[in-house]
Image (tube, rainbow, N blue to C red):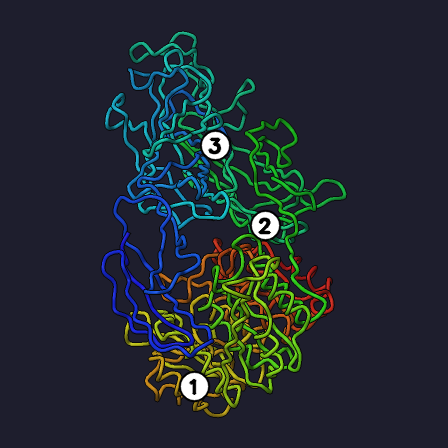
Amino acid sequence: VDWDGYSVSAFGMSVKELGASGSDLDIELGAKSANSPATVQVSEVKYSTTDAAGDVVVTARLSGVAFTPDSAVDGTVVQTPPNAPTLTLTARSKPQLDTGASAGVAGTWTLALSGDSAEGSGWVAGSDLTVTVSPPSGTNCDGNDYLYFVGTPTVDVASSSGTSANPSVSASVTNDGACASTQPNELKLSFANAVYFDGTSTGTVEITVGDVRYAVGTTASAIGTGDVGVAASFSESPSTVDVADASNATIVVTPGHSGTPPSGSGTPPGETSTPPIESGTPPSGSGTSLAVQADTPPVTVLQDASDAAISPVHVVGSARTHVPVGYVCFTLSGSYFDTSASATVTAAAGNGSVGAAVTYQSDAGTGATTATFQVTKASTTQDEYTLTGLAVDAETKTGPVPVTATYGASPTCTQDSVVIGSVTAFTVASTPATRIYGATPDATAAAELEHQFDAVGTHCPGRPGARPVVLATDARYPDALASAYLESSLGTGELLTPTRSLSAATASAIRVEGVTQVYIVGGPLAVSTAVSQKLEDTLAYDCGGTTPLTSDGPVHIEVTRIWGATEYETAQWVAEYPPSSDVGSLDVSGAYAGANSTGGTGKYNDTSGNESVAPATSSTLPTAIVATGRTFQDAESASVLSYVERLPILLTTSSSLSPQVSSAVSNLAIKQVVVVGGPLAVSDKVVSSLESLGVSVLRIAGHDASDTSVQLADFEMASRAGHLGAGWDGSGGVTVARGDYFTDGLAGAVVAAGAGRTHTHAPEPLLLCADPTTVGQYLSGFLDEAGRSGIDGDAADRVVSLTVLGGPQAVSPSVVTAMIGDL
């Protein structure tokens, strides 16, 4: 293990970096005042490794000084290749396929991979998972006893958590040697990147394999009837593969066939010359080779959700049996179709025709449980009919909601109906609204910190020996507005306190979280010297707050104050306190496009305010956030963007650019500024002044503070590949705080960012409701779209949960209920 990257900084003394060679990093220490503490910090550490495995141990050596302890573990090198994860392959449905099918549609597979970081599980780039299929007889590709893939199935990573990276997977088909090259009986899933399970508990990856189609042998006596055989193997070893439920199709004898192979060109014994049924009369007997498919991709809706969009449903025929002329009905069990949705039906395959109308039927005294369409002309080739644009009103019962497909001659599908099959249409999830709050503003900030760092074992902020927290006054908001960038740099969150004394809730959180360093943001008029002195006299505790730390005597909390004469200066010094290399960069050139009806410019601007033209370069640019220092809402909403992307927040007056912003832009080599707020908050004159500094200016603004938070959310979740925004992956949730007062959301960036060691998740927007009793039209509209089709229309960013910052007096239960209803 060798050094491959690092940044050296110090507090309480000067240092000189002598450089790294192999496994050694040499640092020359400068003078230190007697009887005062000093810390040397090595951050942004990267290592290069060969074939080492196990813990990376860092040992400190200083002539004449004994360290206690003298070494620490700074990571683990997992085995290469790693232990294979546990794999479970299951089929979500099992359609029936005819003998002789040329492209029979099978069910969708779900592949679940799970592993534990302690076991070193994962895989290296180039690993393959191979799924081999065969007819029920078990013998494949011997004359007419064949079963193989037609076309290449689709593969999609549905979700991943507790992993080092999002898996990149592709699909291809091949054969195992028993079949010819034109008869691929193997599906190979290839993993393009290395992935390790690095969560604190078991990590998971779920992969969906869809559009599986088979060619099936013509002779039932040779291929057998029953479930398709499935075997799976992973290229890494050892591996565990569960294929007990993986058969995604059942082979049946085509109606009218005896199973005896044809002799010559004549009609086989026992078979009539009747063509496949196409006249609307259902096949005789209880079997049918039609199949129903739904819930691809899988959709989860909330309890009591209204007008929630679901995935399309399909009826799929085979090469020999087709959907007849008549009516096809889809009936839900446990929820209702929303009849106001614009559902449409199309003939996705084959040469059949359908009527344009989708009609609904209701049970007596209930909502519409059935959606119906008409087949006006049956196909003579393999067919598929797809119903899209469906929406549902969910009931309170949670779990999968099945949909049953039938067909018959009656538009009510109650007479002479034939059941095609039943599959899951969507899943109802319990109402996931989580509140984080305390009895006071300071207690709420403490609860937010403790929600992300649960103070168990090593779950406290920072790391053993250097556990920092940021502290600001609860009386005013400007100092705390700029703190998210510092919190992110330190790997911690924020606490609040009254000006004159340290609040009990804050003191308790400092002890329980094992805080050893407090960074006060704001001068003595914001957080008094009495508070800082109190902290310096306070013993530091271990993580969990049970035992005081000792090192040749009691260890007291180290206090650093960052402040200026005004809130604008304080924001500047906060921005310049971390190394300038900490400043994040964004390429959001696509977000500059467009103009709105009021004359303003920018994709995420609803106001008349202007911005720059798009940057000439397509590369990422060092970026800062600029907001007004006169109100809190815009900077508070942007605090999550600051935390996640490491973007300093600078404050300005509305009418003219604060000189502190100019200085910070120059000192930090900022090339792009995101202005949050409309022209009443940050005027066009300020934008012009920023442009004169040589920076590109993107404005994100709404009609009011709540709308601005909505515009910012769209920007945060927009495509990074399209340079439209920050490109955050959806967490499935959003965080909400009241928009008329600052204390609950002021320290909430760490929660919405998903930072910490406990409740980690993909970052999610911080949105503002109008006030404690009102959602507000902009937030309501946003949640409605986010719950139906995803943030900014991206289905991958659908919102199904809320985290509310503040108690019932801050965001009332009625507002929470209304927001859930919007979802």
Mark 2 or mark 3, which is nearer the start of the sequence? 3
Residue closest to the far front: 64
Measure the alpha-carbon separation of dots 1 and 3: 57 Å
Image height of 260 relative to 397, above or below: above
In this figure, which residue is indicated by the disc labeled 2? 391
- Left or right of 201, for residue 130: left
Name the element at disc 3: strand
For residue 784, above or below residue 322: below
Q: Is residue 595 among what the camera can see?
A: no
The residue tagged 1 is 661
SS at mark 2? Answer: strand
Nearer-the-camera pick, 282 or 587: 587
Label 1's element? helix
Which amino acid, by three-letter code, is at mark 1? Val
User: Which amino acid type is marked by label 2?
Assistant: Ala
Q: Which residue is mark 3?
A: 90
Mark 2 vs mark 1: in front: 1
Quadrant in the picture for residue 347: top left
Q: Quadrant of the C terminus?
A: bottom right
Residue 639 on image: x %, y %: 51, 72
Question: Neighbour class for label 3 at 10 Å: few (<14), some, many (≥20)?
Answer: some
- Residue type at the position of mark 3: Thr
